[in-house]
Amino acid sequence: MGAASYTLLMVALVTYSVVHGSSQIFSYEGLNFLTGTDWNAVEGRESFGALPYIVGTLVSAGIAMAIGVPISLGIAIFISEMSPSRLATPLSFIIELLAAVPSIIYGLWALFVFRFWIRDFIEMPLYNAFHGSVPFFAKYPFGLDVFTAGIVLSIMIIPIVSSICREVMRVVPNSQREAAYSLGATRWETVRIAVIPYAKSGILGAAILGLGRAVGETMLVTLVIGNVIGAAAIPTSLFSQSQTLSSLIANEFNEASSDLHLSALIGLGAVLLMLTIAINIGAQLLVKRMVKVPSGEKN
Amino acid sequence: MSRGSGKNYRTLIHDQMKKKYQRRIIINNLVTVFAIICLVAAIVPLGSILLEVIKNGAGVLSFEFLTGPQGSIITGKGGIGPAIQGTLIVVGLASLIATPVGVLAGIYLSEFAGIGIFPSAVRFLNDMLTGLPSVVIGIVGYVTIVIALGSFSVWAGALALSIIMIPIVVRVTEETLKIVPHSLREGGYALGISKAKITMNIVLTTAKSGVLTGIVLGIARIAGETAPLIMTILGTSLFFSSLNGPVDALPLRIWRLASQPYEHAHAFGWGAALVLILMVLSLNVGLRLLAYRKGFAIRTEV
């Protein structure tokens, strides 16, 4: 019981540290901290606003979700419903290895290898085709931008999202599948009419858990997002440089010039904490509900 | 006349069903292809990461690189000795804190807690702790220890990493203890053994490989963490001197090297990445192979 209380103590410690550390900035800026766009640490002209980084965080995580979730779902469907059972174990093994690679190594790889693939094979063609007509693609791409960050984040969340989706699909009772097959459904139709509706809330929960990861990820984003500050960090196109809450903390923490600056960075941490707690609670409620549904009961 | 039109009608229906059936088969095949493409899309980055790290990192590996202090990165002298040493110290200390706490909390939740508000609160908060961004946990180390001590220190780093590791150990321990068959515990009770002894000697012994799995998974996870180390151990080019002073770590060194504009720094970064990935992946792969042979499952999402 003592050890279990330690967990509670840790949660209290996290809350205390973040609240205590950021109190100075919230009393200095008030709610402007959440809506302002300036970021100036020069003494005498201090002004800190977190809005651009909140937007940057949401946009990069949004891109990661848009790409990562369908791919994870495809992988989960393939491994749990389509692949021969002999392949399922090695395949999930490989996907789980992806989860074991530290995020700093993803970052290194993204910075020196992957961003050139993205720039040359995806961004440049899109830019050449659409830069006059679609504002999304208006900026000349360098490879260090929200789009790259989003894609690398999507690779990072694939293992966790797909393994939870697989888990959730595994608890779908076989009688559901057999019913669909007995009506003459093809394999995909079985997945669509029997498996997915049953696993829906679990899949949604998995996606939200992935969102929590993408929002909190730091090092990889720091290396590839371009790191601009101030109003310029609000991405105006897919190929804009940007900044997220966590990457700004990592970039400036060791160079913080004053207590107020430090407090502002911890304030960013507080915003991030709120964001991830909300996301995680939502996800856990969804996943728990799903896994608790007894077999055969209507969902 | 009516017979003839009936026949035509039937062939019409038959043709339409055949067409529709073919369309369904085609859609089914398209989806299968899409699923395979998804799988490939996930495997290609993994392959590329491993390839690049080995290709770029193997060249700089040498005895001096692994043990030497950081020299001039502009000319490519020196090594990452302090980083390897620092990682071992910080991760070791963190797991010394996290293992007893995590295992005991797991035992409590599975064996003693039963159902109630307190255990479910612990479970809920434990799951929440797993989902917290590591950069926020670094802030905890900074505010509680770095400010109090007045200096970046090993302790702060170990505290931060232990907060990341504890929930993993708690969850895996609880889940493995729960699958120990009840008959084993009942056997113990029938012999009149106390509950504490049953837990330690029977339940924990039976579940030992599972519990160990949780610990090693936790270690592999925290060995690669970077963000919390920025605000706790800071990183230095010197070897370890005191638990109250800054120290270097591999992930931190990779980050600093990658941010520098020199070719040699990048080469060193790849070399450090190779060392780190070898450490982390060998822990992971070894564990999974062992688990596969012994026939128990490892969940990734912890």
Image: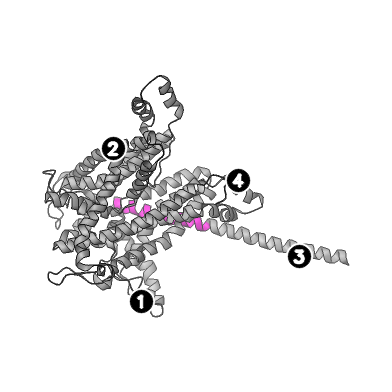
Q: Is residue B16 left or right of residue A217?
A: right
Which numbered disc flags the more N-terminal residue, 4 or 2?
A: 2
Mark 3 element type: helix
Letter of the chain that mark 4 sits on in the rendering: A
* Mark 1 or mark 2, whichever is nearer to me: 2
Q: Amino acid at mark 4?
A: Ser
| Quadrant in the picture for the N terminus of chain B | bottom right
Query: Label 3 to label 2, Cα distance in Å?
Result: 76 Å
Marks 1 and 2 on same chain? yes
Query: Label 1 to label 4, Cα distance in Å?
Result: 52 Å
Quarter of image, res B202? top left
Please provide the residue range marked out in magenta.
B33-53
Determine which residue is flagged by label 4. A175
Q: Which mark is residue B12?
A: 3
B39 within the magenta span: yes
Letter of the chain that mark 3 sits on in the rendering: B
Determine which residue is flagged by label 1. A138
Q: Amino acid at mark 3?
A: Leu
Determine which residue is flagged by label 2. A2
Q: Residue at x 65, y 60 (%)?
A: B22
Query: Label 4 to label 2, Cα distance in Å?
Result: 45 Å
Mark 4 element type: helix
Residue B106's x, y, as percent?
Answer: 35, 37
Of B116 and B127, nearer the camera is B116
B64 within the magenta span: no
Most common SS among magenta residues: helix
Residue B142's x, y, as percent?
Answer: 19, 52
**Does the CB distance between marks 1 and 4 fall below 8 Å?**
no
Q: Amino acid at mark 1?
A: Ala
Mark 2 element type: helix
